[in-house]
Image (spheres, rainbow, N blue to C red):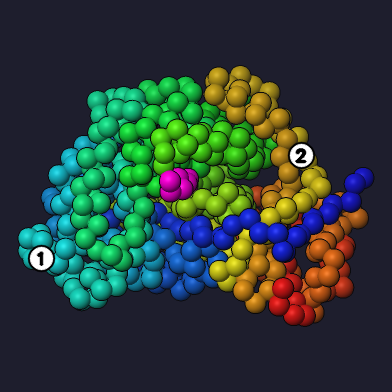
Amino acid sequence: MLKQKISIHPNSMKHQPTSYIIATCRNHTAESYFWHGETTLTIPEKVAAYGSITPQVGARRKLYRIGHGPTDGRKDYDGYTGYHFKEWFDKPGKYPYDDIRYALKEAIQMDADMSIVVNFGSGTAQEAYELAEYLYNPDFWLRKQYPISTIADCTEQEWDNIHKYRIKFFEIGQEITWDVVIGSETKARTAKLYAQNALAFVENILRVTGRYDQAAIKIGMVGSTNSTWSTSYWSSDIKTNILDIMSVMRDKMDFFVFHGYPSWPLYEAYPGPDGFDPKKDPIKVLAQNTYNNQLIENLIVKAIEEGRNKFGIKKPITIGNTEYHAELGKQVTATMDYRHAGLQAIYTADTMISALKQNLEMAVNFCFSHASWPGAPDLIDDLFFHPDRNNPKKPVFYVHEFMAENLSGAGMVIDHTEIHPYRYDVEYDYEVSKSGEIFWEIRDKRINQLSVVATKDHNGKIIVLIANIMENNAPTTEGLSINLDPGIAYERAIMKTLAFDTYFDETCEKTETDVTAYVNNLWIKKASINAIIFTPKKAI
């Protein structure tokens, strides 16, 4: 059997790793601040725990996405009428809406940058203008009436001198390509119509932020609600949708948004005769990022570059994954809940690795906390924390912590990271939709067992990050060899590992091993995330 080998070329650089990967999305209201019990973990405690994580790679900052499913409004839930921020001042709010200052407060306490999702579907361009004025202009009448400092953990001066410049992104609409979202049929029936209506929103935001030299914000336009970039109403030709949006927005946009959930029909009921197979079906979920990477490389990036050339757009147009988690729906989680276990953690790590390799703007784990009623149960979307204060942290929290601790510096992603792939056949034996058939065909039904990215910091330290996404020992009994270019000398190699016994294991094992003498024969544990850190003898 072919011996596994990863070749690292530290002096061949691809791009700076600027992606926000220590990132999460708000999906609760301040009403839950006031739910207390002897063992119930509160939102402020969760905020403090996540705030303790300090990333040293990518943007070197955390990102807090303010906005979620109900932002534009939804037709499939009562009370999801859309978020109109002026209606919620001085209200902690029942789920899903509350005073925006609570969200700003959490971002400040987390020491996180912010992405603001603008209500496009049920909102107006004037409302977008007023939101920007409220966030940026200390003399705006709403700021005078409802000071940010009344709730947020800062003074007005601190907000205006520091924190408002931590708003890095505005997203125009939430999942507006989906027919259950308010406005999808009337304001965004086609990609071009969406862009034409969104342009006034964007111009109003830029009219405000343009007055502040330090306000280096980026505008995100919705490309898709899912990983297949399919939509309810738009063209089935993804490139057409991208070009239509770019033809209108030109240089007034910065990136396309997609949500990296496993593709449907995997999400809901399994049509197979045997239902959910815990041995095979998790692999199909983990195969998602292989598909995402290929689709982005082979279609999305090329379509964007074609649009830049066609419409004379000088600045880069990038991509952002603003929501993701491993999702199979209630049918699966009701009997075998892996959302809070190893599989969710491995999917998170693999998505982070993909974001760094693809140089995405961000990869945002949905969601930070999901609390909809007093004594909120351990809801399936709440990825980071159990309600129980005595056992609060879920595996996904430890992945964010691991990545922040072990990927260091504002270094460069090393290009030409070569891996002789140990591939795993992904089988499926049931009827799926047309998009599902394309989904599997594109990936050729095979995925790499190891997900790999490598970085180098300014001190020459090389970090090789390896996720073994399979629930079996990897890669072969012969071990794994990591080969640096000739002439790259190092003093020491340390391997740090976060490992799970099974996909459904809710506990993880942390180890640290000196592997200086074994870099040509490493054993990578099953279902594990590994950072092999090479300390050079001299700066490279």
Quadrant of the drawing holding the N terminus: top right
- Residue pictured at 45% horizontal, 67% vertical: 61
- Amino acid on which the number 1 mark rests in the picture: Asp
> Residue flagged by tag 2: what amino acid is it?
Tyr
- Residue holding disc 1: 139
**Could one spot residue 216 in this view of the protein?**
yes
N-term-proximal mark, 1 vs 2:
1
Distance from the alpha carbon under mark 1 to that under mark 2: 60 Å
Quadrant where the C terminus is found in the figure: bottom right
Mark 1 and mark 2 residues within 8 Å of each other at the beta carbon = no
Where is residue 248? Give x, y as percent. Answer: 33, 33
Q: Quadrant of residue 24?
A: bottom left
Report the magenta residues as a range: 314-321
Left or right: 442 in relation to 136: right
How far across and down, in percent of the image, does residue 196 sit? 27, 32
| Residue 55 magenta | no
Q: Position of residue 535 (x, y in %)?
A: 73, 76
Check disc 2: other Cα within 10 Å, few if <14, some if 14-19, many if 20+: some
As drawn, 60 above or below 417? below
Q: Residue furthest front?
A: 312
Tell me what residue is drawn at x 81 percent, y 47 percent.
420
Percent of width and height locating residue 390: 48, 70
Residue 184 is tagged as none
> For the point 25% across and 29% down, which residue is it?
187
Task: Report which residue position mark 2 lands on.
Answer: 424
